[in-house]
Image (cartoon, helix red, strand yellow):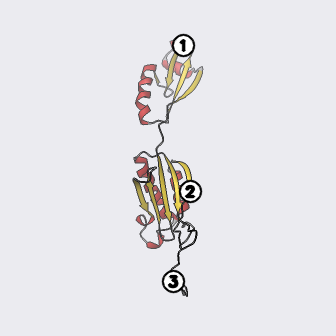
Amino acid sequence: MRLWYTLSETETVTEEEVKEQVSETSSEAPKKTVKVATESSEAASESSKAAAKTVVETTTQTMKEGKEKWGIAHIYSSYNNTIIHLTDLTGAETAAISSGGCHVTADRYESSPFAAMKASNAVVEIAKAKGFTALHIKVRAVGGVGSRVPGPGAQAAIRALARGGFKIGRIDDVTPIPHDTTRRKGGKRGRRV
């Protein structure tokens, strides 16, 4: 029995050439697959085109997947802006950072879902270039005496990161919520509207 590796309907490759191609591509693209076709001895004697068409058995061998590189996407979302900050797992080294204000011209649009999506797409491009394959996401609102609900751009930022092709691990809310708050600004009589 002779092994033939079918690339297309008209082109076939010998076993040695495929081994060279697999060894070259294993370091470049870890998720590609190579189809292996086993043929009968009668088909091996025919021309290569006819041999490629008469396939007896087909198995798929998946190459080894590369190791995943995890990062943490810190999303700070208020009613004034959305900031996406990508770090490594320790949180010490910044890989990419972008805000909604970098991608729109008017101040009132900085916290919009569109600006958050554009900022996330900018972070996705940088993260892919640096080799990140998976992300944990930490969402933060203003917290403290401010709003405890994330702004309008948080959900759009998470969606854009997920659509970027990353594996998503955890999505955590890390808004700082005090057990007993500090005194709000505005004085004893409060904010007079």
Looking at the picture, how far across and down is residue 38, in whole percent?
55, 19
Mark 1 lies on residue:
1
Number of numbered discs: 3
Quadrant that contains the N terminus: top right
Looking at the picture, how far across and down is residue 154, in whole percent?
53, 62
* Secondary-structure class at tag 3: loop
Tell me whether the residue at label 3 lies in contact with that at label 1, contact meaning CB atoms closer than 8 angstroms.
no
Q: Would you call the spot at circle 2 few (<14 residues within 10 Å), some (14-19), or many (20 or more)? A: few
Amino acid residing under circle 1: Met
Amino acid residing under circle 2: Asp
Mark 2 lies on residue:
172
Q: Residue at x 56, y 68 (%)?
A: 178
Q: Nearer the viewer, residue 3 or 175?
A: 175
Q: Tell me, for residue 186, which label it has, or none.
A: 3
Looking at the picture, how far across and down is residue 128, in whole percent?
43, 47
Observer-side mark, 3 or 2, equals 3
Query: How far separated are the C-alphas under marks 3 and 1?
Result: 86 Å
